[in-house]
Image (cartoon, grey):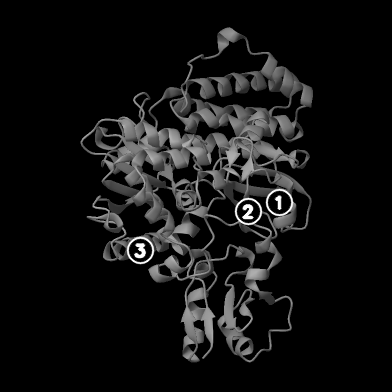
Amino acid sequence: MTTAWVPCDASAVAMGADDVAAAFEARGVTVRRNGSRGMLWLEPLVELETDAGRVGYGNVTPTDVDALLDGSLSDDPARCIGIVDEHEWLTRQHRVSFARVGLIEPTDIAAYREHGGLVGLQRAVALDPEQVVQEVTDSGLRGRGGAGFPAGIKWETVRTADADVKFVCCNADEGDSGTFADRMLIEGDPFTLVEGMAIAALAVGATEGYVYLRSEYPHAIRTLRRAIDIAYAHGVIGESVLGSGRRFDLDVRVGAGAYICGEETSMLESLEGKRGEVRAKPPIPALEGLFGRPTVVNNVLTLSAVPMVLADGGAAYAALGTGRSRGTQVFQLAGNIRRGGIVEADFGVSLGTLVDDFGGGSASGRPVKAVQVGGPLGAYLPTSRFHLPMDYEAFAEANAMVGHGGIVVWDDTMDASLMARFAMEFCAKESCGKCTPCRIGSTRGVEVVDRIRAATDDGVRRTQLVLLEDLCTTMTKGSLCAMGGLTPMPVRSALEHFPEDFGVRPDDAHDAAAAIPESATVTTEGARP
């Protein structure tokens, strides 16, 4: 009997995957629902089991089912991509966190074990907590949520803290534009996240964990809750994690859609039932986090890398990547791009390789003008920066950030001044309002950019450029968190790389930055986390 794999990922469902699955079932075909392979331009990507392997067919509709079953589409290179596991787009990647996504049914725990799942947790059970933390430290794993803080240092701080209760919290409030890796991993392989959180709990002595998951991800919410129930039933979590005698309870909490809750302390406030608002630091969450107790806060991709770290050892993970950026990152290609989707590769892969080679350039066929890396607060980079390696330090030196790994592409019709305005407008709408530089600075920022765009006199424009730079400096140095502190990054990068879109010469933009006297800037050190 024929078996068809039809993705249940939200991206495939949005393109009609459920109807395709129903059409197969109506013809007596065994249908299995997997996560997405990440080749989003081909969704729904249906795979038929054959003796040679699973053969993929792209952009399948219910009306294609008969032709697909009788072999009529097999010779159409535009529809049949051959053995999916052998496809060049996948074989060039190095899938670690996404190793099982698309291969198995998301909540099939037996298949999860067969493909290497729970090996890391079993090893963690056999080690002392400090040994588990040491493996994570040795791996060089850094926070994949954007900050890049070493996970081992955070875990050790929580482990050594004295408290009656400790927590592990996963921030799955994936709100950055062009990011969808958290959602796809939860929908395609939720046990990897459950396992990673259980390992973290054993390492630091936590007994309770929460996944803070955005309400805009209903498929992910259902899948993760189902996976947690199964994990309890199989003794993976609960009263005795894999028979270790150590307890770990895990639950899902659904956020209400506030972008600011992607910031760890705002998320903790929301988990406590309060308004999502940034906390001042210190104290840090590792010492006084959820309900004032020591708390590990990591994002989905960070925690999902942990099972591999424990399974293969910290040294094996540290052997991947470059410089201080160890391991792999899950890059997300979106925007005006021909082949959007998920690319997991070692740190160090170039920006150009991701956009041009994996992404295939712009979907419109026009020249690429800019890419924004790291979400709506990331820098706009021109094609002249495509040589940059995806590396935390290399991007920081270029006044940019890797962030959560999202890459959004624009062709040459983009207006960079409008994008700079959008950055300020976005901050004004999403700010929690607690600090003045962010709340008021972003509002004034929209007004200043509007005046620059409307100016017909060079003198007026130069004056407004000086004001904009002063405003950006104040927001960067005076904001409580990265919301206001990073908003100037896309504004400054747009002005630096695309000054003509603001009606100014490159020298004018440079002179505006140099015109700010030291006395005019806020000098609050350590304002951003």
Give the mark nearest the N terminus, 2 or 3.
3
Determine contact: label 2, label 1, CB under 8 Å: yes
Q: Which mark is residue 333?
A: 2
Q: Residue 505, percent across and down?
A: 79, 26
Q: Is residue 286 above or below residue 101?
A: above
Q: Identify the secondary structure beneath mark 2.
A: strand
Q: Residue 482, percent across and down?
A: 49, 31
Q: Is residue 122 left or right of residue 320?
A: left
- Of residues 395 and 168, the one nearer the viewer is 168
Residue at position x 57%, y 20% in the image = 473
Callout 1 amino acid: Val
Q: Residue 31, percent across and down?
A: 48, 81
The answer for how far apart the CA atoms under marks 1 and 3 are is 34 Å
Q: Which residue is mark 3?
A: 227
Q: Identify the secondary structure beneath mark 1.
A: helix
Q: In front: mark 2 or mark 3?
A: 3
Give the mark nearest the N terminus, 2 or 1.
2
The answer for how far apart the CA atoms under marks 2 and 1 are is 7 Å
Q: Residues within 10 Å of mark 2 (few under 14, many from 20)?
A: many
- Of residues 273 and 507, the one nearer the viewer is 273
- In which image quadrant can residue 460 be found? top right
Callout 3 amino acid: Ala
Q: Is residue 427 above or below residue 239?
A: above
Residue at position x 49%, y 80% in the image = 21
Q: Which residue is mark 1?
A: 355
Q: Is residue 354 left or right of residue 425?
A: right
Q: Identify the secondary structure beneath mark 3.
A: helix
Q: Residues within 10 Å of mark 3 (few under 14, many from 20)?
A: many
The answer for how far apart the CA atoms under marks 2 and 3 are is 28 Å
